[in-house]
Image: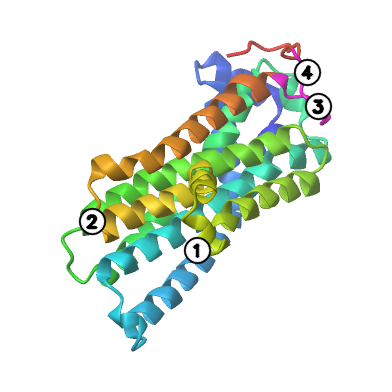
Amino acid sequence: MSALSTPRGALTAGVGRSRPVWWLVLTQELKELWIGGRALNLLILFAVLMSATSFLLATNSELSLTPPRLMMVVALQSTMSFGLFIGLIVGAESVSGERERATLEPLLLTPAGRRHVILGKYLAAVSPWPVAMVLAVPYVAVLAQGDVAFWIALAWGAVLGTMLTLFFTGIGLLASIWSGSSRTSLFVGLLIYLLALLPAQLPGEFQTTAAGAVVQALDPLESVRRFLNLYLVDGLALDDARAMLIGPIIATVATVVGVLGIAAPRLALDGGTMSLWPRASKGTEA
């Protein structure tokens, strides 16, 4: 049963026991996501893909000549891409899907603040990412071949992957909050994801120009990819490489603030454009 279809009495009882509403929403969403099998099925697919990728990198006569650090970066990029993709899909369906099933109204009629509802759903949507990161550790370890940069690569992969997952999941949630159907929000989310993949496909000549540098700096996914390559593979000093992270950090902070500070208080039973003022709520808004 979805968090937004939780009976009003259950939520009220939870609030009475000083249990935060966002925690109740989170636990219900986690049950649906994990016990329902959606996240588990996607992570099984991720493990299969990582096994195939790692086997290819380690055994192919040409690819096996690739430096261990580059193979680690490839594995980490694959992990981050899959983790943020799951978050994007779950986030894009989380509110608009409830709206389609007419299960949004029961929760909005309880003392639950709208920001609590979105916070609980946000945390649930990013929950597959740490599991994906843990599953990726043995693959990265095999590809590292004892390289001393293994732990550094894992640390940066965890931090940057969390940042990207928060960003793309937030984008999915924003689309879901203001969409009347999950089909629309999924389309918007996937379109933004595809646009984020585009800079890496641009010709090398364009990427070396000033315009190409601007495009890469504005794209969080491409900026993180370049940072990992410059810092871990090319050996660029951290002080010089960290400039690539300014764009992703700003984008992630702006997205989280946009979701919880601007969009969440305006959560409505129907989709539509953003109103200037937060919508009135019978519950307390936190």
User: Counting other residues with Cα less than 10 Å from the Cα at mark 3, is it few (<14), some (14-19), or many (20 or more)?
Assistant: few
Q: Which residue is mark 2?
A: 235
Q: Which residue is mark 4?
A: 275
The answer to whether residue 94 shows anywhere in this view is yes
How far is disc 2 from disc 4 in space, using C-alphas?
48 Å
Q: Position of residue 54 (x, y in %)?
A: 38, 74
Q: Quadrant of the N terminus?
A: top right
Comes first in the chain, label 1 or label 4: 1
Numbered disc 3: secondary structure: loop
Quadrant location of residue 2?
A: top right
Disc 4, SS:
loop
**Camera-nearest residue between 53 and 109:** 53
Amino acid type, mark 2: Gly
Q: Which mark is residue 273?
A: 3
Which residues are drawn in magenta? 266-276
The three-letter amino acid code for the residue at tag 4 is Ser
- For image coordinates 28% across by 43% down, the residue present is 240
Horizontal arrangement in the rendering, residue 162 relative to residue 188 (left or right): left
Give the crowd class for mark 1: few <14, some 14-19, many >=20 residues within 10 Å. Answer: few
Asked if labels 3 and 4 touch by Cβ distance under 8 angstroms, the answer is yes
Of residue 152 and residue 115, the one placed in the foreground of this image is 152
